[in-house]
Image (cartoon, coloured by chain):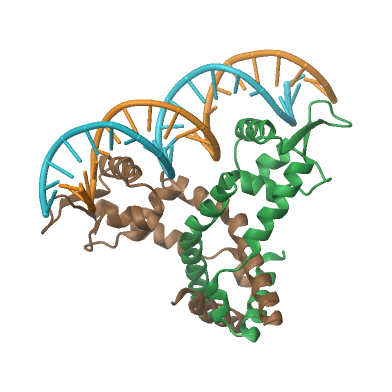
Chain colours: A green, B brown, C cyan, D orange
Amino acid sequence: MARANRDGCAAWHLLVEFLLSQRTHLPNLAAALELSPTQCHVLHLIEPGRPIPMKQLAATLACDASNVTGLVDRLESRGLVRRLPGRTDRRVKELDLTPTGARLRTELMSRMTSPPASLGRLSVRDQRTLVRLLTLLRDE
Amino acid sequence: MARANRDGCAAWHLLVEFLLSQRTHLPNLAAALELSPTQCHVLHLIEPGRPIPMKQLAATLACDASNVTGLVDRLESRGLVRRLPGRTDRRVKELDLTPTGARLRTELMSRMTSPPASLGRLSVRDQRTLVRLLTLLRDE
DNA sequence: TATTGTTATACTCTATAACTATA
DNA sequence: TATAGTTATAGAGTATAACAATA
Protein backbone atom coordinates (compact mmCIF):
# COMPACT_ATOMS: atom_id res chain seq x y z
CA MET A 1 0.00 0.00 0.00
CA ALA A 2 2.98 2.30 0.42
CA ARG A 3 3.39 2.68 -3.31
CA ALA A 4 -0.33 3.21 -3.86
CA ASN A 5 -0.37 5.89 -1.20
CA ARG A 6 2.62 7.65 -2.66
CA ASP A 7 1.19 7.84 -6.17
CA GLY A 8 -2.26 8.63 -4.86
CA CYS A 9 -0.86 11.50 -2.83
CA ALA A 10 1.12 12.79 -5.79
CA ALA A 11 -1.96 12.70 -8.00
CA TRP A 12 -4.03 14.40 -5.35
CA HIS A 13 -1.37 17.02 -4.80
CA LEU A 14 -1.40 17.81 -8.51
CA LEU A 15 -5.19 18.01 -8.52
CA VAL A 16 -5.05 20.42 -5.59
CA GLU A 17 -2.50 22.57 -7.39
CA PHE A 18 -4.68 22.49 -10.46
CA LEU A 19 -7.62 23.46 -8.29
CA LEU A 20 -5.79 26.42 -6.78
CA SER A 21 -4.44 27.56 -10.12
CA GLN A 22 -7.99 27.49 -11.47
CA ARG A 23 -9.40 29.48 -8.56
CA THR A 24 -9.20 32.51 -10.84
CA HIS A 25 -10.61 30.77 -13.90
CA LEU A 26 -14.20 30.29 -12.79
CA PRO A 27 -14.52 33.78 -11.28
CA ASN A 28 -13.25 35.35 -14.51
CA LEU A 29 -15.54 33.26 -16.64
CA ALA A 30 -18.41 34.03 -14.28
CA ALA A 31 -17.75 37.76 -14.31
CA ALA A 32 -17.96 37.81 -18.10
CA LEU A 33 -21.59 36.70 -17.73
CA GLU A 34 -22.13 39.00 -14.73
CA LEU A 35 -22.46 36.01 -12.44
CA SER A 36 -20.66 35.06 -9.25
CA PRO A 37 -18.98 31.65 -9.00
CA THR A 38 -21.71 30.48 -6.64
CA GLN A 39 -24.41 31.64 -9.03
CA CYS A 40 -22.64 29.67 -11.77
CA HIS A 41 -22.69 26.63 -9.54
CA VAL A 42 -26.42 27.03 -8.97
CA LEU A 43 -27.15 27.41 -12.68
CA HIS A 44 -25.04 24.34 -13.33
CA LEU A 45 -27.02 22.35 -10.76
CA ILE A 46 -30.52 23.19 -11.98
CA GLU A 47 -31.36 21.37 -15.19
CA PRO A 48 -34.14 23.14 -17.09
CA GLY A 49 -37.52 21.56 -16.37
CA ARG A 50 -36.18 19.61 -13.39
CA PRO A 51 -36.88 21.82 -10.36
CA ILE A 52 -35.03 21.08 -7.12
CA PRO A 53 -35.97 22.04 -3.54
CA MET A 54 -34.01 24.87 -1.97
CA LYS A 55 -33.01 22.50 0.81
CA GLN A 56 -31.27 20.25 -1.69
CA LEU A 57 -29.42 23.22 -3.16
CA ALA A 58 -28.13 24.13 0.29
CA ALA A 59 -26.97 20.55 0.81
CA THR A 60 -25.15 20.37 -2.53
CA LEU A 61 -23.53 23.77 -2.07
CA ALA A 62 -22.68 22.70 1.49
CA CYS A 63 -23.85 26.00 2.88
CA ASP A 64 -26.47 27.07 5.38
CA ALA A 65 -30.06 27.23 4.12
CA SER A 66 -30.22 30.91 5.02
CA ASN A 67 -27.68 31.70 2.30
CA VAL A 68 -29.78 30.07 -0.37
CA THR A 69 -32.53 32.59 0.29
CA GLY A 70 -30.35 35.55 -0.68
CA LEU A 71 -28.67 33.65 -3.49
CA VAL A 72 -32.01 32.76 -5.04
CA ASP A 73 -33.37 36.26 -4.36
CA ARG A 74 -30.63 37.70 -6.57
CA LEU A 75 -31.08 35.12 -9.31
CA GLU A 76 -34.85 35.58 -9.20
CA SER A 77 -34.61 39.36 -9.38
CA ARG A 78 -32.63 38.92 -12.58
CA GLY A 79 -35.34 36.64 -13.94
CA LEU A 80 -33.08 33.58 -14.12
CA VAL A 81 -34.85 31.26 -11.68
CA ARG A 82 -38.37 30.80 -10.31
CA ARG A 83 -39.61 29.62 -6.90
CA LEU A 84 -42.35 27.03 -7.35
CA PRO A 85 -44.56 25.81 -4.46
CA GLY A 86 -43.87 22.19 -3.48
CA ARG A 87 -46.52 19.84 -4.84
CA THR A 88 -46.92 17.69 -1.76
CA ASP A 89 -45.26 19.63 1.08
CA ARG A 90 -46.26 23.27 1.21
CA ARG A 91 -43.21 24.18 3.26
CA VAL A 92 -40.97 23.33 0.32
CA LYS A 93 -40.13 25.70 -2.52
CA GLU A 94 -38.70 24.23 -5.68
CA LEU A 95 -36.38 26.09 -7.99
CA ASP A 96 -36.68 26.01 -11.75
CA LEU A 97 -34.89 27.93 -14.46
CA THR A 98 -36.80 30.50 -16.48
CA PRO A 99 -36.30 30.40 -20.26
CA THR A 100 -33.78 33.23 -19.80
CA GLY A 101 -32.02 31.24 -17.08
CA ALA A 102 -31.94 28.15 -19.28
CA ARG A 103 -30.38 30.12 -22.12
CA LEU A 104 -27.76 31.62 -19.82
CA ARG A 105 -27.05 28.15 -18.44
CA THR A 106 -26.42 26.85 -21.95
CA GLU A 107 -24.03 29.71 -22.66
CA LEU A 108 -22.30 29.18 -19.33
CA MET A 109 -21.89 25.44 -19.81
CA SER A 110 -20.52 26.06 -23.27
CA ARG A 111 -17.92 28.48 -21.95
CA MET A 112 -17.03 26.28 -18.99
CA THR A 113 -16.54 23.33 -21.27
CA SER A 114 -14.27 25.03 -23.76
CA PRO A 115 -10.90 23.65 -22.76
CA PRO A 116 -7.78 25.69 -22.00
CA ALA A 117 -4.82 25.54 -24.36
CA SER A 118 -2.88 23.30 -21.99
CA LEU A 119 -5.13 20.36 -22.83
CA GLY A 120 -4.04 20.60 -26.43
CA ARG A 121 -0.53 19.65 -25.37
CA LEU A 122 -1.78 16.16 -24.54
CA SER A 123 -1.88 13.60 -27.30
CA VAL A 124 -5.28 12.27 -28.29
CA ARG A 125 -4.43 9.04 -26.56
CA ASP A 126 -3.48 10.87 -23.37
CA GLN A 127 -6.65 12.90 -23.52
CA ARG A 128 -8.71 9.73 -23.70
CA THR A 129 -6.79 8.23 -20.82
CA LEU A 130 -7.42 11.35 -18.76
CA VAL A 131 -11.13 11.07 -19.50
CA ARG A 132 -11.11 7.47 -18.34
CA LEU A 133 -9.27 8.23 -15.10
CA LEU A 134 -11.38 11.25 -14.20
CA THR A 135 -14.51 9.23 -14.88
CA LEU A 136 -13.25 6.61 -12.47
CA LEU A 137 -12.68 9.31 -9.88
CA ARG A 138 -16.14 10.71 -10.33
CA ASP A 139 -18.21 7.52 -10.35
CA GLU A 140 -18.94 6.20 -6.90
CA MET B 1 -8.28 17.79 -34.93
CA ALA B 2 -11.94 16.94 -34.49
CA ARG B 3 -11.11 13.93 -32.40
CA ALA B 4 -8.55 15.79 -30.34
CA ASN B 5 -11.07 18.52 -29.63
CA ARG B 6 -13.73 16.05 -28.63
CA ASP B 7 -11.54 14.25 -26.13
CA GLY B 8 -10.02 17.48 -24.91
CA CYS B 9 -13.47 18.88 -24.28
CA ALA B 10 -14.56 15.75 -22.48
CA ALA B 11 -11.48 15.85 -20.26
CA TRP B 12 -11.99 19.52 -19.54
CA HIS B 13 -15.66 18.99 -18.79
CA LEU B 14 -14.70 16.33 -16.26
CA LEU B 15 -12.11 18.61 -14.71
CA VAL B 16 -14.69 21.37 -14.39
CA GLU B 17 -17.13 18.98 -12.74
CA PHE B 18 -14.39 17.87 -10.42
CA LEU B 19 -13.64 21.51 -9.70
CA LEU B 20 -17.25 22.30 -8.85
CA SER B 21 -17.65 19.17 -6.75
CA GLN B 22 -14.54 20.18 -4.82
CA ARG B 23 -15.75 23.74 -4.25
CA THR B 24 -16.85 22.57 -0.83
CA HIS B 25 -13.69 20.59 -0.07
CA LEU B 26 -11.24 23.45 0.33
CA PRO B 27 -13.63 25.63 2.38
CA ASN B 28 -14.29 22.74 4.78
CA LEU B 29 -10.63 21.95 5.11
CA ALA B 30 -9.85 25.63 5.57
CA ALA B 31 -12.52 26.08 8.22
CA ALA B 32 -11.01 23.26 10.26
CA LEU B 33 -7.86 25.40 10.56
CA GLU B 34 -9.91 28.59 11.02
CA LEU B 35 -8.75 29.86 7.66
CA SER B 36 -10.66 31.09 4.64
CA PRO B 37 -9.97 29.50 1.24
CA THR B 38 -8.17 32.65 0.14
CA GLN B 39 -6.02 32.61 3.26
CA CYS B 40 -5.13 28.99 2.46
CA HIS B 41 -4.15 30.06 -1.02
CA VAL B 42 -1.88 32.75 0.39
CA LEU B 43 -0.22 30.37 2.84
CA HIS B 44 0.27 27.93 0.00
CA LEU B 45 1.93 30.63 -2.13
CA ILE B 46 4.42 31.90 0.45
CA GLU B 47 7.26 29.46 0.97
CA PRO B 48 8.94 29.98 4.33
CA GLY B 49 12.06 32.14 3.97
CA ARG B 50 11.12 33.23 0.45
CA PRO B 51 9.23 36.50 0.89
CA ILE B 52 7.15 37.81 -1.99
CA PRO B 53 5.95 41.38 -2.69
CA MET B 54 2.30 42.11 -1.99
CA LYS B 55 1.93 43.17 -5.62
CA GLN B 56 2.89 39.69 -6.75
CA LEU B 57 0.37 38.15 -4.40
CA ALA B 58 -2.37 40.32 -5.90
CA ALA B 59 -1.31 39.23 -9.38
CA THR B 60 -1.29 35.53 -8.52
CA LEU B 61 -4.61 35.73 -6.70
CA ALA B 62 -5.92 37.77 -9.64
CA CYS B 63 -7.51 40.28 -7.32
CA ASP B 64 -7.18 44.00 -6.76
CA ALA B 65 -4.20 45.13 -4.65
CA SER B 66 -6.57 46.75 -2.16
CA ASN B 67 -7.86 43.33 -1.14
CA VAL B 68 -4.39 42.10 -0.31
CA THR B 69 -4.10 44.77 2.36
CA GLY B 70 -7.05 43.44 4.36
CA LEU B 71 -6.12 39.85 3.63
CA VAL B 72 -2.61 40.37 4.96
CA ASP B 73 -3.92 42.49 7.86
CA ARG B 74 -5.93 39.53 9.09
CA LEU B 75 -3.11 37.04 8.63
CA GLU B 76 -0.68 39.41 10.32
CA SER B 77 -2.99 40.02 13.28
CA ARG B 78 -3.00 36.26 13.81
CA GLY B 79 0.78 36.23 13.71
CA LEU B 80 1.00 34.10 10.58
CA VAL B 81 2.75 36.51 8.20
CA ARG B 82 5.07 39.49 8.44
CA ARG B 83 5.42 42.60 6.27
CA LEU B 84 9.08 43.24 5.49
CA PRO B 85 10.32 46.49 3.91
CA GLY B 86 11.57 46.06 0.34
CA ARG B 87 15.37 46.01 0.19
CA THR B 88 15.77 48.20 -2.88
CA ASP B 89 12.40 49.90 -3.37
CA ARG B 90 10.93 51.37 -0.20
CA ARG B 91 7.44 51.41 -1.67
CA VAL B 92 7.42 47.61 -1.73
CA LYS B 93 6.45 45.42 1.21
CA GLU B 94 7.44 41.80 1.12
CA LEU B 95 5.52 39.06 2.86
CA ASP B 96 7.15 36.29 4.81
CA LEU B 97 5.74 33.58 7.01
CA THR B 98 6.35 33.70 10.74
CA PRO B 99 7.42 30.44 12.41
CA THR B 100 3.78 30.00 13.44
CA GLY B 101 2.67 30.64 9.87
CA ALA B 102 5.21 28.17 8.54
CA ARG B 103 3.96 25.50 10.95
CA LEU B 104 0.34 26.14 9.97
CA ARG B 105 1.36 26.00 6.31
CA THR B 106 2.94 22.59 6.85
CA GLU B 107 -0.21 21.33 8.55
CA LEU B 108 -2.36 22.81 5.81
CA MET B 109 -0.30 21.32 3.00
CA SER B 110 -0.37 17.98 4.74
CA ARG B 111 -4.17 18.06 4.97
CA MET B 112 -4.57 19.33 1.43
CA THR B 113 -2.36 16.58 0.14
CA SER B 114 -4.09 13.75 1.92
CA PRO B 115 -6.08 12.23 -0.92
CA PRO B 116 -9.81 11.48 -0.84
CA ALA B 117 -11.00 7.88 -0.85
CA SER B 118 -11.94 8.06 -4.52
CA LEU B 119 -8.25 8.04 -5.51
CA GLY B 120 -7.87 4.67 -3.84
CA ARG B 121 -10.21 3.20 -6.44
CA LEU B 122 -7.55 3.76 -9.09
CA SER B 123 -4.94 1.08 -9.61
CA VAL B 124 -1.35 2.01 -8.86
CA ARG B 125 -0.70 2.09 -12.58
CA ASP B 126 -3.64 4.43 -13.17
CA GLN B 127 -2.50 6.66 -10.34
CA ARG B 128 0.93 6.99 -11.95
CA THR B 129 -0.62 7.73 -15.31
CA LEU B 130 -2.78 10.42 -13.73
CA VAL B 131 0.32 11.98 -12.20
CA ARG B 132 2.02 12.02 -15.60
CA LEU B 133 -0.96 13.60 -17.36
CA LEU B 134 -1.56 16.25 -14.71
CA THR B 135 2.14 17.09 -14.77
CA LEU B 136 1.89 17.60 -18.52
CA LEU B 137 -1.08 19.90 -17.98
CA ARG B 138 0.78 21.90 -15.38
CA ASP B 139 4.13 22.37 -17.07
CA GLU B 140 4.18 25.17 -19.60
C1' DT C 1 -42.26 18.77 18.04
C1' DA C 2 -39.63 18.79 13.83
C1' DT C 3 -38.74 20.82 9.28
C1' DT C 4 -38.49 24.44 5.37
C1' DG C 5 -37.50 28.63 4.41
C1' DT C 6 -36.88 33.59 5.97
C1' DT C 7 -34.92 37.51 8.54
C1' DA C 8 -31.32 39.85 11.31
C1' DT C 9 -26.59 40.28 12.13
C1' DA C 10 -21.67 39.88 11.53
C1' DC C 11 -17.37 38.63 9.06
C1' DT C 12 -14.64 37.74 4.83
C1' DC C 13 -13.73 38.41 -0.08
C1' DT C 14 -13.98 41.27 -3.93
C1' DA C 15 -14.15 45.66 -6.87
C1' DT C 16 -13.70 50.76 -7.68
C1' DA C 17 -12.03 55.15 -6.53
C1' DA C 18 -9.34 58.41 -3.94
C1' DC C 19 -5.28 58.85 -1.24
C1' DT C 20 -0.06 58.61 0.63
C1' DA C 21 4.64 57.67 0.12
C1' DT C 22 8.15 56.66 -2.88
C1' DA C 23 10.35 56.32 -7.45
C1' DT D 1 4.27 61.21 -13.67
C1' DA D 2 4.01 56.47 -12.46
C1' DT D 3 3.94 52.74 -9.01
C1' DA D 4 3.11 50.09 -4.31
C1' DG D 5 0.27 49.97 -0.92
C1' DT D 6 -3.64 51.95 1.94
C1' DT D 7 -8.30 53.62 3.06
C1' DA D 8 -13.28 54.18 2.21
C1' DT D 9 -17.17 52.22 0.42
C1' DA D 10 -20.28 48.87 -1.55
C1' DG D 11 -21.99 44.17 -3.04
C1' DA D 12 -21.84 39.15 -2.58
C1' DG D 13 -21.00 34.75 0.01
C1' DT D 14 -21.05 32.55 4.35
C1' DA D 15 -22.30 31.40 9.37
C1' DT D 16 -25.30 31.59 13.60
C1' DA D 17 -29.49 32.48 15.89
C1' DA D 18 -34.31 33.61 16.14
C1' DC D 19 -38.58 33.30 13.69
C1' DA D 20 -42.97 31.93 10.66
C1' DA D 21 -45.54 28.56 8.31
C1' DT D 22 -46.35 23.91 7.68
C1' DA D 23 -45.98 18.98 8.75
Looking at this view, name the residue that lies furthest to the right: A88
Residue A66: % across, % down? 61, 30
Q: In front here: A5 or B113?
A: B113
Residue A138: % across, % down? 68, 65
Q: State whether residue C13 is above or below residue C17.
A: below
Asked whether residue A48 is in view, the answer is yes
Asked whether residue A132 is in view, the answer is no
Q: Is residue B131 left or right of residue C17?
A: right
Kindly identify the residue that appears in the image at 67 percent across and 34 percent down.
A78
The N terminus of chain A appears in which quarter of the rendering? bottom right
Kindly identify the residue that appears in the image at 29 percent across and 45 percent down.
B72
Kindly identify the residue that appears in the image at 14 percent across and 55 percent down.
B86
Q: State whether residue B94 is above or below residue A99.
A: below
Q: Is residue B68 left or right of residue B51?
A: right
Count the labels in the image. 0
Q: In front here: A22 or A67?
A: A22
Residue A113: % across, % down? 65, 63
Kindly identify the residue that appears in the image at 28 percent across and 41 percent down.
B73
Q: In front here: A74 or D15?
A: A74
The C terminus of chain A appears in which quarter of the rendering? bottom right
On the image, which quarter does residue B127 sit in? bottom right
Residue A82: % across, % down? 76, 34
On the image, which quarter does residue D23 sit in? top right
